[in-house]
Amino acid sequence: MGLVTSASGVVQYYREIIYDNPFKQWEYGFYCYLIFFFLLGATEYHFRLERKKEDPFIYPELVMDEDELEARLQDGEPLCLLDDLILDIGEYAKYHPGGAFLISQNIGRDASKFFYGGYTMANKDTTHGYAHSNYARKVASSIAIATLNRVTKVMKAEIDTTQTNKW
């Protein structure tokens, strides 16, 4: 509403200038262009700063191990990994800028190599990976449902201490 009020006030002021003084018309036009290019430059500067920044992922409190993740995948939940984040990509797939196909192909897989631009899903030498922006990191944090606990079955096994001192 404030923008509409401001715009209507500027239009009214401009109408009064048209009939008043040609020099004021030129001055008004100059200031309009000056303000426009200042705002354009400030927006571009903010965009470039935001693009370079890397906010850390926000890890959810829920922790899943690999067996629980595998069970959920067997039940048909559309989950994928990004580093140690477990992402629920079911609803987000239709909003992904690269298309739902790219997301759906990574269900049950670790998508980190695609997220950071190391790999592409095309087999051509002309394509290169796309390193996602800081905004994509925020989106990934918002759809994260759990943190993966990468404790393997070997780590879970008990160590037989009677066999360790035989050397």
Image (cartoon, grey):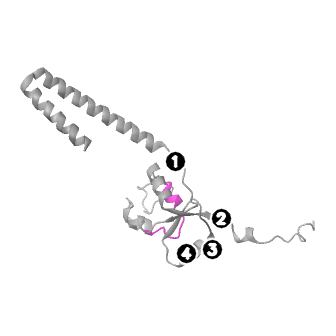
Segment colored magenta? 104-117
Write down the residue under mark 2: 150
Q: Residue under label 4, please give it.
A: 72
Helix, strand or loop: magenta stretch: loop
Is residue 86 found left or right of 98 in the rendered image? right
Decide: is 37 above or below 74: above
Task: Compare marks 1 and 2 and give the one earlier in the sequence.
Answer: 1
Q: Is residue 108 above or below residue 119?
A: below
Residue 70 colored in magenta in the image: no
- Tell me the kind of residue under disc 1: Asp
Q: Which residue is mark 1?
A: 55
Decide: few, some or many residues near mark 1? Use Cα within 10 Å; few <14, some 14-19, many ≥20.
Answer: few
SS at mark 2 in the image: loop
- For the residues labelled 2 and 3, the Cα–Cα distance comes to 10 Å
Q: Per the image, is 107 magenta?
A: yes
Q: Amino acid at mark 3?
A: Asp
Kind of element beneath mark 4:
helix
User: Quick check: 40 above or below 120?
Assistant: above
Q: Earlier in the sequence, mark 4 or mark 1?
A: 1
Q: Looking at numbered disc 2 in the image, what kind of residue is underneath it?
A: Arg
